[in-house]
Image (cartoon, rainbow, N blue to C red):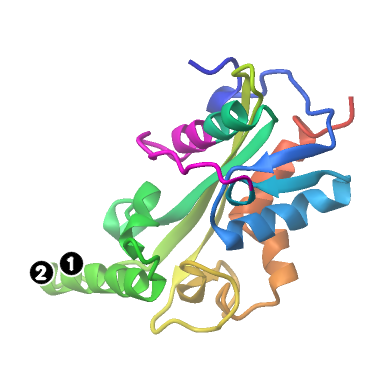
Amino acid sequence: MPENGGNSGFGGRRFDGNRLVVASHNPGKVREINDLIRPLGIEAISAGELGLPEPEETADSFVGNAELKALAAATASGMPALADDSGLAVDALGGDPGIYSARWAGPEKDFAMAMAKVNDAILAIEARTGVPQTRRARFVCALCLAWPDGHVETVEGEVVGDLVWPPRGEGGFGYDPIFAPAGHDQTFGEVDQDWKHSVSHRADAFDKLLATVLAPL
């Protein structure tokens, strides 16, 4: 079992190093996390660069999967590791695809297919019930920093918005082209990416991490 941390609050340990592993093989996630930690003077190396295997995501929550991935990378590398687990939770689908957001894209990571699955699932409910469904959705992100001794610190962030169809924009990655944050007409695929990074679910989680784990000693 990991020590402290988790989603129950700040466990008390702060990161005081200048190098860590980003426990991801997803170039988009690695890029966003690097953009967030670079101003702190922290050098990051991805799990992919180190040739670390991707652990099977067997937890039943974003927090659980983030901790699993961070601990696997920290143990294998002997360095502190930062992992992200994130996804799209659609109200009309009972929170799906949720922790299975990447799996909806299949082994080829075909997010055009995944976005179509989301839209088709909502349309199927409407056809079956005859009731228009809400397009409300949330991007959720859990960030976990794990140390090789098994200690973890975990936070969770989110951004609320609405789904659009068809997809719009070439920016971002994953489900970004069908998600418009609340109060905005443009999708995360259309907006300036620096602005997106400042308001995203990952930014929300990172702000919490910055206020606790990455705060100066």
Which quadrant is home to the C terminus?
top right
Q: Which residues are magenta?
A: 50-69
Q: Is residue 139 left or right of residue 190?
A: left
Where is 127 relative to 149, above or below?
A: below
Where is 46 relative to 31, above or below?
A: above
Pinpoint residue 183: horizontal percent, then vertical percent. 60, 70
Camera-side residue of 168 and 152: 152
- Does the magenta segment cover residue 8? no
Residue furthest to the front in view is: 51
Label 2 crowd (10 A; few <14 / some 14-19 / many >=20): few
Residue 112 falls in which quadrant of the image? bottom left
**Residue 90 visible in the shown view:** no
Q: Is residue 35 left or right of residue 75?
A: right
Location of mark 1 (residue) = 125
Location of mark 2 (residue) = 128
Q: Marks 1 and 2: in contact by CB < 8 Å?
A: yes
Residue type at mark 2? Arg
